[in-house]
Amino acid sequence: MEIEIIQVPYEVERTDTAAARSPAALLAHGFLDRLREAGWTVHASEVRAPDEDAARAPIVAEVSRAIARAVAAAHSRG
């Protein structure tokens, strides 16, 4: 069994909210290790946003495109 974890540490365009910090907190507390212990082969990646000082719409658009690319890459790996 394989699973792809795509970490998206953003809430809209912000990285400083509880929701934005949640992916890193899950990983820091052993989420990937627990999946592996349960028998999963785990692949993990992180979506990075452009400069947070940019306007909101371009940040949201770029994060969305990055998520789409990550999903496409995971899909191509099966």
Image (spheres, helix red, strand yellow):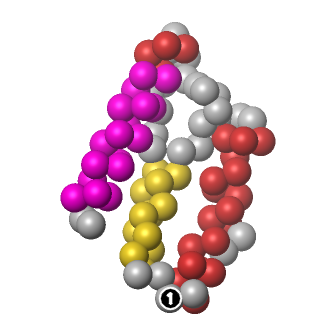
The quarter of the displayed image where residue 2 is located: bottom left
Left or right: 24, with 43 as reference point? right
The quarter of the displayed image where residue 25 is located: bottom right
Quarter placement of the N terminus: bottom left
Could you tell me how many numbered marks the image carries?
1
Q: Residue at x 75, y 35 (%)?
A: 17
The picture places residue 14, in percent across and down from the top left corner, at 64, 28
- Residue 40 forms part of the magenta stretch: no
Please identify the dominant SS of the magenta region.
helix
Provide the residue designation for mark 1. 39
Task: Name the kind of residue labelled 1 in the image.
Answer: Gly
Instruction: Single out the residue that lies furthest toward the right.
Output: 18
Q: Residue at x 45, y 44 (%)?
A: 47
Judge whether 39 appears above or below 55 on screen: below
Judge whether 11 appears above or below 56 on screen: below
Q: Residue at x 67, y 41 (%)?
A: 20
Quarter placement of the C terminus: bottom left
Instruction: Single out the residue that lies furthest toward the left.
Output: 76
The picture places residue 41, in percent across and down from the top left corner, at 42, 80
Left or right: 12, with 5 as reference point? right
- Report crowding for label 1: few under 14, some 14 to 19, many 20 or more residues within 10 A (C-alpha): few
Left or right: 51, with 32 as reference point? left
Q: Secondary structure at mark 1?
A: loop
Judge whether 37 appears above or below 7 on screen: below
Judge whether 71 appears above or below 67 on screen: below
Q: Quick one: 28 or 7, which is closer to the camera? A: 7
Q: Quick one: 17 or 41, which is closer to the camera? A: 41
- In this picture, which residue range is highlighted in magenta? 60-76
Q: Residue at x 28, y 49 (%)?
A: 72
